[in-house]
């Protein structure tokens, strides 16, 4: 794990909010990143929900150049680390630092003892030269369904292959079953857990004792707006997390 990166995020036993920005263009990304910074978040994730990865890369280069000191993560939509890590390595060689990569599918198969695909991704990561934080999706929305009775096994098998295990509800904007998050928390022990769907200022208190990082978009956006953060809703969510401590069940 890139521990300095992670230690900057997770402090004092409090869950951390890293907003997710569905990017349209450089200007829209920068405006939202300034909202994130102004609210006191440590950083944000950018995702190319509306266009291909290849068109996303020039945007990332411009955003990083404009905000050189901001903690910045990315999600290349529908791409595993096997695709993402070499791209991140190339960006790093160009001087475009990306601090974290979040993949929706870390290719963990709880039904198998050997994790051949996750092992291959780990090798690609090591060869890429990229040194950021890896958040890997496990039992994640829009991926192969995992039986609830296998959630603990999936979480445990994921541990060796990523810095932060990341799970979700059943769809974008859908809150996760609390039993699922409880199961992941117990299976992971002290290892970090991220949650990436359905978090809102109204329900965050339920998850805050269990989760280290909230990746949140629709829950803090303006109503009916997929692309822009509502500062009032972001501040309301942050107020909830500031008053919550992981491990202290409500």
Image (cartoon, rainbow, N blue to C red):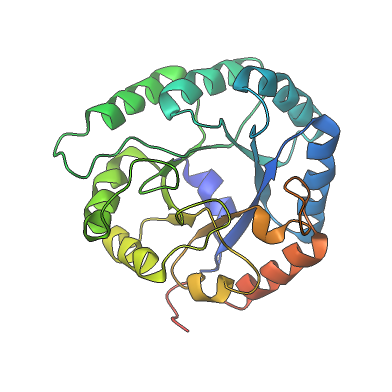
Is 75 left, or right, of 247 in this rendering?
right
Q: Residue at x 56, y 30 (%)?
A: 76
Which of the 4 quarters of the picture holds residue 126? Answer: top left
Location of residue 161 with respect to 165 vertically, above or below: above
Give the x, y percent position of residue 134: 46, 38
Closer to the camera in the image, 4 or 75: 75
Location of residue 115 with respect to 228 vertically, above or below: above
Closer to the camera in the image, 26 or 37: 26
> Is residue 129 visible in the rendered structure shown here?
no
Is 48 left, or right, of 145 in this rendering?
right
Q: Residue at x 49, y 61 (%)?
A: 212
Q: Residue at x 57, y 71 (%)?
A: 204
Q: Which quarter of the image is occupied by the N terminus?
A: top left
Give the x, y percent position of residue 74: 60, 35
Which of the 4 quarters of the picture holds residue 147? Answer: bottom left
Q: Number of labelled discs?
A: 0
Q: Residue at x 47, y 73 (%)?
A: 209
> Is residue 17 visible in the rendered structure shown here?
yes
């Amino acid at each position: 794990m890139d521990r300095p990166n992670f230690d900057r995020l997770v402090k004092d036993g409090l869950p951390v909010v890293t907003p997710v920005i569905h990017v349209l263009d450089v200007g829209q990304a920068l405006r939202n990143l300034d909202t994130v910074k102004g609210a006191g978040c440590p950083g944000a994730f950018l995702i190319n929900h509306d266009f291909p990865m290849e068109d996303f890369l020039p945007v990332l280069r411009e955003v990083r150049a404009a905000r050189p000191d901001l903690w910045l993560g990315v999600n290349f939509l529908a791409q595993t680390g096997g695709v993402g890590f070499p791209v991140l390595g190339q960006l790093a060689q160009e001087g475009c630092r990306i601090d974290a990569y979040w993949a929706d599918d870390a290719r963990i198969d709880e039904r198998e003892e050997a994790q051949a695909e996750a092992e291959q991704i780990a090798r690609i990561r090591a060869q890429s030269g990229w040194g950021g934080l890896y958040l890997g999706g496990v039992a994640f929305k829009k991926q192969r369904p995992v039986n609830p009775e296998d959630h603990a096994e999936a979480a445990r098998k994921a541990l060796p292959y990523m810095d932060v295990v990341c799970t979700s509800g059943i769809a974008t904007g859908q809150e996760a079953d609390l039993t699922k998050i409880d199961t992941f928390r117990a299976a992971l022990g002290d290892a970090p857990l991220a949650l990436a769907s359905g978090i809102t200022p109204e329900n965050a208190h339920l998850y805050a004792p269990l989760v280290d990082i909230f990746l949140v978009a629709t829950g803090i956006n303006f109503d009916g707006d997929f692309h822009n953060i509502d500062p009032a809703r972001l501040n309301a969510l942050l107020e909830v997390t500031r008053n919550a401590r992981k491990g202290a069940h409500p």
